[in-house]
Structure formats: structure tokens, C-alpha cells
Image (cartoon, rainbow, N blue to C red):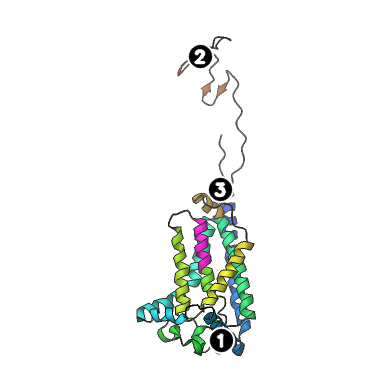
Amino acid sequence: MTSHTTPAGAAAARRAARRRLIRELLLVAGLFTVYKAGRTLSTGRTEEAFRNAARIWDAERALHLPGEGAVQRLLLHGDALVHTANTYYAAVHFPATALFLVWLYLRRPAHYLWARRVLAVLTGAALALHLGFPLAPPRMLGAADLIDTGQVYGPTVYGAAPATDTMANQFAAMPSLHFGWALMLALGMIAATKSRWRVLWLLHPLLTLLVVVGTANHYWLDAIVATVLLGAALLLVPRPDAGAGDDGDADADAGAGRGLPGPRTAPAPAAAPGTRTADGPAAAPGTHTVDGPAAAPVPAGAER
């Protein structure tokens, strides 16, 4: 007789899954809240932020990095193009990262834990750098001669006056978490999937890089520093074993808490010869069965 999961056991599994999901949502939301609140601690350091901006601009020229204006001039070829870039900057960053984590949680739970920890380490390191190195973005730097495309063409997530902007710290340009999170999203999807086209996920951080630079919200060095911090986080956080979380629906059940094992049952004892079983009386050795007479024992030494 086969044992099945009882309704009470299934209900308990669903409750456990809901608790795990709520816990994860609260944890991720808490991390983002701490990050957003922590960024505001570096406000009021305007002069230092502009001094650092001048240093970064000079360092990029010394390193012969391409000017940010080259990318912006490409965007300014049409209002629709620059408006799309501004929309991408304002609307894709948080939702894309959230969808990435939700998909991993439901489909690749082992990779979800890995990605969440990496993002937490990256974000914590970025917050420390934002607090210790306030930096005005290139759109504010006169030497850069760039347009604040968000203010001119819209949409924008920043207030016109940085000192009175209560929604965001505009002097937290380095590192670019827009780029850092986008790069982690791409690497996470490449690691968690098996499609031969998965390398195309790298188009997301590439497009993000062009957008953050072309809209004059970040320097090239902001993205470079984000890449270095992400590399350090990847070294610190162990990656899941090969094949972990790659079993499709089985992993979805595990991630959602629905794949709990049923009660262990012992195998039924074998029926003794000649006793009655659920399927009828057992055939005695050498008697006729439905499939024909039973084979007689072969005498010793009869094999050839």
C-alpha cells in the first residue's frame, strides 16, 4: 500500500513556503531600504563631491578613456532615442533586479541564495564607498560640458536642485550600481540557465553602461569600480555546485517550499510461498500459472 502526503501535510508545506517567501521579501526590501537610507548620510558634502568629480575627470583623461560626451552625442541624434535612454535609466534598474531575484527564487533556489548574497556584498561595499567618497556625476561637472538629459528631455528620477532632493543622493555616483546590478543579473542568468543563447544576457549590462554614461549620470570609472567590487563579491561568495537548481519544476517546488518529502514507508514483506496475497493465491513451485507451467528446477551439471 503506497503512502501519500496527507492534506494536513500539504497545508503545512504551503504555510512554510509562504513564510519563507515573506521572509525573503522582507530581507531583500530591508537591504534596499538600508541602502537608500544610508546614501542620504553623505548629503551636505557638495564641495567635496565636486572636488572628487574633478579628480575623476582628470584621471580618465590621464588613462585615455573615451569621453562620456561621445556616447551622449549619439543619443542626442533624436529626441525619441534620448527619451528612451532616460526611461531605461529610470525604470529598468530596480524592476529588472527584482524580477531576476524572483525568478531565481522560484526556479533556481540555490542560485537565488548565491545571487542574493553577492548583491548584498556588492551593495554594502558600494554604500561604504558612497559615504567615503561623495562624487558629483558628470552632468553636474562644468569641465565635462555634458547635458543633463533627464532634466532636459525627461523622464528623470532626480530633483533639479541636488541639495533639496530628498528622494536620492545625487552625489553617490561611484560606483554605478545601475551597471553593477545589471552585470550580476547577466552573470546570474548565464550561470543558472543552459541555453546556448544565454550569453546574450550580457547585452543588458552593455546597454546599461551606454545609458548611464550617455545620460551623464556616471563616469566610465564608476562602471569600472563597480566591476571590480562585483568581482571581489563573487570571490567571497561560494558559487552553487554545478547543476544545482537546474531541475526545472523540481527546483520550483523546492524553492517555493512545495516539494517536501512525504512520509517514509517500509517495503511490504514478500508473501510466503503458497499464501494468499491481494492479487490471489501464490503459485506453488512447479504448478501451472496463467503464463504457462512453471519451469522445473534444472538438475546440477545439466548446463552446457
Could you give the CA–CA distance between mark 2 and mark 3, rounded to whole angstroms? 47 Å
Sequence-wise first label, 2 or 1: 1
Residue found 61% across the figure and 66% down from its top: 232
Magenta stretch bounds: 182-197
Q: Is residue 97 visible?
A: no
Q: Quadrant of residue 298?
A: top right
Q: Badge 3 is on which residue?
A: 7
Q: Nearer the viewer, residue 87 or 223?
A: 223
Q: Badge 2 is on which residue?
A: 295
Quadrant showing the N terminus: top right
122 lies above or below 214: above
Where in the figure is residue 218, as x and y percent of width and height? 51, 79
12 lies above or below 165: above
Query: Do tag 2 and tag 1 residues touch (Cβ < 8 Å)?
Result: no
Disc number lying in front (2 or 1): 1
Badge 2, how many Cα within 10 Å: few under 14, some, many 20+? Answer: few
Where in the figure is residue 213, as x and y percent of width and height? 47, 78
Query: Do tag 1 and tag 3 residues touch (Cβ < 8 Å)?
Result: no
275 lies above or below 101: above
Task: Give the overall secondary structure of the magenta segment.
Answer: helix
Magenta stretch containing residue 294, yes or no? no
* Three-letter amino acid code of the residue under disc 1: Ala
* Three-letter amino acid code of the residue under disc 3: Pro
Q: Badge 1 is on which residue?
A: 54
The reply, left or right, for residue 195 in relation to residue 57 is: left
Identify the secondary structure beneath mark 3. helix
Could you give the CA–CA distance between mark 2 and mark 1, rounded to whole angstroms? 95 Å
Identify the secondary structure beneath mark 2. loop
Badge 1, how many Cα within 10 Å: few under 14, some, many 20+? Answer: some
* Three-letter amino acid code of the residue under disc 2: Ala
Where in the figure is residue 72, as x and y percent of width and height? 42, 80
